[in-house]
Amino acid sequence: MASDKRLYTIDDLIDKAKTYINKEEDLNKIREAFALCKEKHEGQFRDSGEAYYFHPLNTAIILTTVYADCDTICAGLLHDVIEDCGMTKQELEDEFGPTVANLVYGVTKISKIHFSTENEALIEYYKKIIVGMSEDVRVIIIKLADRLHNMRTLWAKDEEKQKKIARETLDILAPIAHHLGIHKIKSELEDLSLRYLKPNVFYDIADKLNNTKLERDKVVNDMIASVSNLLKENNIEHEIKGRSKSIYSIYKKLENGRKFSDIYDLLALRILVDTVQQCYSIIGMIHAKYKPIPKRFKDYIAMPKPNGYQSLHTTVFGIDGYLFEIQIRTHEMDEVAENGVASHWSYKEHKDLKQLGTNTTEAKLQFFKSIIELNEDKMSSEEFVNSVKNEILNNNIYVFTPKGDIFELPKGSTPIDFAYSIHTRVGETMVGAIVNDSIVPLDYELKDNDIVKINTNKNSPGPSKEWLNIAKSTRAKNKIRGFFTRNEKDNYIERGKAELEKELRKRKLSFSEFLTDENLDEIYRQSKAVDLNDLYLGIGNGKFSGSYIVNLIYKKDESPEIKKVEVPKNVEGDIIVEGIDKIKVNLANCCNPVPGDEIVGYITKGNGISVHRRSCHNLAYLDNRMVNVSWNPEKKNNRFITSLFIFCHDYDKSLLEVMQKASSSGISIDSMHNIRKDDEIVYEVDIWVRDLEHLNNYIRDLENISCIEKVVRIIK
């Protein structure tokens, strides 16, 4: 595990960058970025005591270890100048160009997010960082380097902050480093996190490693000599190095019940050669000389991991019967294994940077593609984060099409998940599946390296709702739900149109007579429907009744007749009932009236008076057992529940805004549910308010928010 070196200079950085950056203009640009960094951070100091500019300098040093390009190093040096020094993005762009400015701005956005692994805020924040970093992978590489140096100096923080930062590093950033394939950063982040989260465990493992180091070193050196002689006899140029197991990886094995003495891959070798052919030749030689452990051979050269990792793995009985894990790869594969996607931004290979970025992102980063697709599915934030944790950041399986294309799926996936991962249309027309040349049921659990063929029929009626219980991935489930939502929407529209036609026939009105342009404008205004289909949808799903819509135009003809009875008023409750004293009074759940609403009472059978808003469409179904009621002006401190539909087009912003506006308005949210309506997000919210004015002020506040399209008070 690397220790922190605080006395790096710009010369150290340039020397490291020179090993793979050849253009003097690029090196001068790095020098200029450092000069600006030092100037902007003048007078600032870190908790560890050194001048602040040492932190971005160390961040840049770490970036050179993964062969980051010139712009990325410059952005590493300047990653805090917008957030901490008041410099604007435009100023940065004027001096260093749009690429550096965008990278710094991207890191700044991530840095402003306060991660938490203990409260619900993580749900929203996690989504933002994952999706945000997908815009340019170099942003997250800078963030990882930034965090690594912060972890190296974490000793300067108090214990509470140490554990908080270590936990978010282990839960959020280290898994991302893993999926980018940046092993050297991922491994050190994990070890440092364990050091602060479980110091006793960390130092216990470290002590055991130290106590057995001499013995292990001797055995490893003897094995290196033996293997090296074997390869020399076969005239294969090579490099062999012992590979140490990280403390965190040992901890995970111990946590799973293994004994320290049984962790055989503590002894490990890595063999580096020039060609793929040599890799396969060597594996044969080693298996011929050293007995391999069954089922421990892995060919990641023919079947690379999605992050680009390639290598041959085997475990053999080596010198004196010790078990050795041996990795065999080319030098180029080793660079990718250590530096991951970062290695593709290197000038070391003298390739076109833009083309490299395009090709490797397309070919290797299924991780990011999966995240972007999940976000586009417009699931709730909680669903999204659970999906990222369970399906992208956890153990997955890798299956193939008959043509050899590889797909990454969550463990436990079925052919249904595979079909939808190819394309939504493949999923919707699937009629069967063949795995490894055998027909399997749709609930068959796929395994690593399965070859899957999906049989489709363009005339298929579509997925079954039972598939929701079979599919494992959130993406497949959302696509299946979306299919039924689309179909149900069409059914609701037909149902709503039929109900409105029936109501018009009952009143002896024609469609053309009722649906004039003037009438439609008034109906849309009051119902908040956007067009005729939206109106039919509202009637069909029960948001409005047909009679309510007709009553919007023919109010006078359809107003319920109210029976007036002159009796003393009941002034004890929230409602004054004219003509009846001391009777049970309920506010109707269908329309939830609040003080200030025009109301009417309905005499129920055995349950007292039910008080409705006069606009409640359910009154059309009631007979004339009505009484006059009014709000008691003496009762001013009570709270009343009512319901809203809030139509939004941006989940991330709207959820927070709805909550904040409620809090600042003195409104309590009783419950909140997500409702999907095609590309629109709709919340159904139950809130407690004082009166109609209080409610209307809140609605106006919400409608002034750019991401909220409209707010509708619900009558059920």
Image: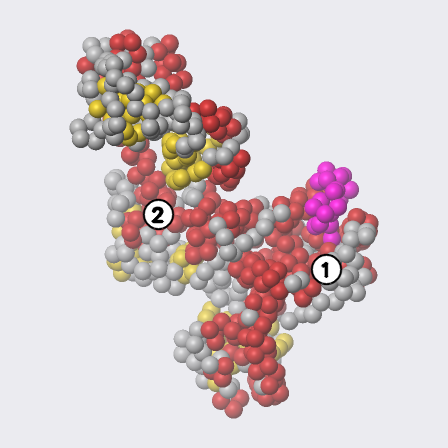
Marks 2,1: beta carbons within 8 A? no
Lateral position of residue 208 relative to residue 3, left or right: left
Instruction: Examine the rendered structure and indicate whether residue 638 appears above or below residue 154.
Output: above
* Relative image position of residue 230 (x, y in whole percent): 57, 84
Q: Nearer the viewer, residue 489 or 251?
A: 251
Residue ID for mark 2 = 477
Q: Amino acid at mark 1?
A: Asp
Tag 2: residue type?
Lys
Does 383 appear above or below 441? Answer: above
**Above or below — where is 591 with respect to 31?**
above
Residue 332 in view, yes or no: no
Dot 2, how many residues are within 10 Å of its Cα: few (below 14), some (14-19), or many (20+)? Answer: many
Q: Quadrant of residue 448?
A: bottom left
Structure colour scheme: secondary structure
Residue farthest front in this picture: 568
Q: What residue sits right under mark 1 in the picture?
A: 47
- Confirm whether residue 436 shows in the render: yes
| Start-end of magenta stretch | 77-96
Nearest the camera: 195 or 612? Answer: 612
Based on the picture, tell me whether residue 93 belongs to the magenta stretch.
Answer: yes
Q: Is 107 above or below relative to 145?
A: above
Residue drawn at x 75%, y 46% is: 85
Predominant SS along the magenta part: helix
